[in-house]
Amino acid sequence: MLRKHIFKERITMQTYLHAEAYLPNNNPIKKRKIDERLI
């Protein structure tokens, strides 16, 4: 159970880092789409 939680956390973090990499100008519209994908 704990291992699965850690794995999920890592996936979320990777997705967040990828999102940051693709958003150098922090476009709010793009950011909202990525937030929806994360949820």
Image (tube, grey):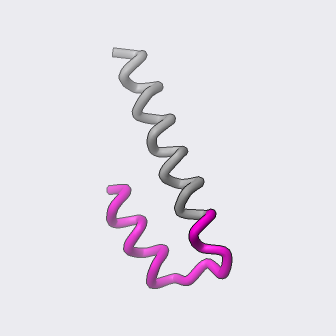
Residue 13, relative to residue 9: is it above or below?
A: below
**Furthest-right residue in this view:** 24
Q: Residue at x 38, y 73 (%)?
A: 33
Question: Which residue appears at 41% of the width and 67% of the height?
Answer: 34
Q: Which residues are magenta?
A: 21-39
Residue 26, quarter of the rendered image: bottom right
Q: Is residue 36 magenta?
A: yes
Horizontally, is 20 left or right of 39 in the view? right
Q: Residue at x 66, y 81 (%)?
A: 25
Q: Main secondary structure of the magenta part?
A: helix
- Relative vertical location of residue 6 with respect to residue 32 in this rendering, above or below: above
Q: Residue at x 47, y 25 (%)?
A: 6
Point out the image quarter for the N terminus.
top left
Magenta span includes 8: no
Q: Position of residue 20 (x, y in %)?
A: 60, 63
Residue 28 position in % (x across, y down): 51, 82
**Residue 4 on image: x %, y %:** 36, 22
Question: Residue 22 location, x and y as percent?
Answer: 57, 69
Q: Is residue 39 above or below residue 23?
A: above
